[in-house]
Image: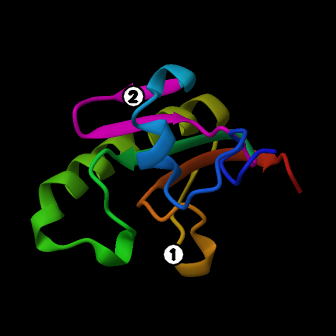
């Protein structure tokens, strides 16, 4: 049985630390450096659906501290680049992060998406 991540058997609450970051070979990676990972969502909700995450565990946007300023700058730079590329290729893009009950994986992640909902 697949957990929330779409990975068989995964039922944890931090898919990014537990699965994605340690096993990027299993992902369709869009961008990766020592601090940031971006990849096509494993269960895409939109026609184009890319997730951008810091490799350092940060629980959510509301838990970011001053110590995370340079990492957040890098994260937003990568999000901006990917959003630009999605907008150029599809004609539109949206950028989204979730908080609280809306956040299935308790690790800061940003969705860059375009197109109609796939799982509506």
Q: Which quadrant: the C terminus?
A: bottom right
State the extent of the magenta-drawn residues as a range: 29-45
Helix, strand or loop status at disc 2: strand
Mark 2: few/some/many CA within 10 Å (<14, 14-19, 20+): few
Which residue is tagged 2? 31
Q: Position of residue 107 (x, y in %)?
A: 43, 60
Q: Quadrant of residue 65?
A: bottom left
Of callouts 1 and 2, which one flags the residue occurring earlier in the amino acid sequence? 2
Q: Quadrant of residue 44?
A: top right
Q: Is residue 38 magenta?
A: yes
Q: Position of residue 47 (x, y in %)?
A: 75, 38
Q: Is residue 22 above or below residue 44?
A: above
Which residue is tagged 1? 99
Is 117 in front, or is 44?
44
Q: Residue at x 12, y 72 (%)?
A: 66
Q: Residue at x 31, y 44 (%)?
A: 55
Q: CA distance from mark 1 to mark 2?
A: 24 Å
Q: Residue at x 37, y 70 (%)?
A: 61
């Amino acid at each position: 049985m697949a957990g929330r991540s779409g990975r068989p058997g995964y039922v944890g609450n931090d898919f990014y630390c537990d699965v994605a970051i340690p096993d990027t070979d299993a992902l369709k990676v869009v961008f990766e450096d020592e601090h940031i990972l971006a990849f096509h969502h494993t269960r895409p909700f939109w026609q184009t659906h890319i997730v951008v995450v810091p490799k350092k565990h940060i629980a959510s946007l509301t838990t970011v501290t001053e110590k995370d300023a340079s990492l957040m700058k890098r994260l937003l730079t990568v999000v901006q680049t990917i959003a630009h590329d999605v907008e150029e290729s599809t004609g539109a893009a949206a950028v989204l992060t979730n908080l609280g009950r809306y956040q299935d994986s308790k690790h800061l992640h940003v969705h860059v998406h375009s197109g109609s909902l796939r799982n509506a």
